[in-house]
């Protein structure tokens, strides 16, 4: 499948090319990285109706979650850096940090809707009206 791409440049003049959107599989893999670093427990509280179980976050390894999700995002979104598609992530990480930050900013624009996707589903107004009758 051909994807729409965008050619960009870092502030230091390094060219890079990104995919403008993620596949559903890619999006899910980034979310999975963020969630695998969260540990929950089920706490019980007494209520009038009995015991209520509530999930409570016990631990979150933010450092690992951010590092892994940023690296995965760059790996999935950046398809060329400084004229080559070889070892993109390693070459970016071995470059100056300005390039890393500029590339991260570009990838974040692609991944921004991972946490709260906005539905674009259009409904038929007559169907909705009939359903509510």
Image (cartoon, rainbow, N blue to C red):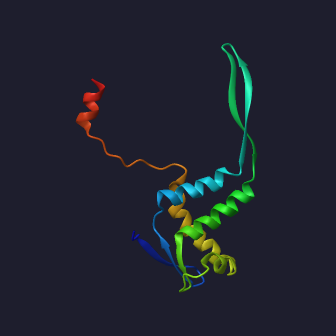
Residue 27, image x, y percentages? 53, 57
Quadrant of image for the C terminus: top left
68 w.r.t. 45: above or below: below
Image point (44%, 49%), residue name: 118
Image quarter of residue 11? bottom right
The residue at the far top in this view is 48
Position of residue 80 in the picture relative to residue 123 (left or right)? right
Quadrant of image for the N terminus: bottom left
Image point (41%, 47%), residue name: 119
Position of residue 27 in the picture relative to residue 98 (left or right)? left
Position of residue 58 in the picture relative to residue 77 (left or right)? right
Count numbered badges in the picture. Answer: 0
Image point (68%, 59%), residue name: 66
Residue 78, image x, y percentages? 54, 73
Residue 102, image x, y percentages? 59, 73
The residue at the far left in this view is 126
Position of residue 19 in the picture relative to residue 29 (left or right)? left
88 w.r.t. 113: above or below: below
Residue 61, image x, y percentages? 75, 53
90 w.r.t. 104: above or below: below
């Amino acid at each position: 499948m051909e994807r729409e791409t965008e050619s960009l440049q870092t502030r230091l003049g390094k060219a890079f090319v990104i995919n403008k959107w993620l596949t559903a599989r890619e999006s899910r893999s980034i979310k999975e990285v963020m969630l695998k670093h969260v540990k929950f427990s089920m706490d019980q509280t007494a209520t009038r109706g009995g015991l209520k179980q509530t999930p409570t976050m016990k631990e979150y390894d933010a450092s690992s979650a951010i590092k892994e999700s940023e690296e995965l995002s760059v790996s999935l979104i950046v398809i060329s850096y400084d004229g080559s598609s070889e070892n993109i992530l390693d070459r970016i990480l071995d470059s100056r940090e300005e390039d890393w930050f500029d590339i991260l900013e570009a990838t974040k624009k692609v991944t921004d809707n991972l946490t709260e996707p906005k539905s674009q589903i259009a409904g038929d107004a007559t169907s909705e009206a009939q359903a509510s009758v």
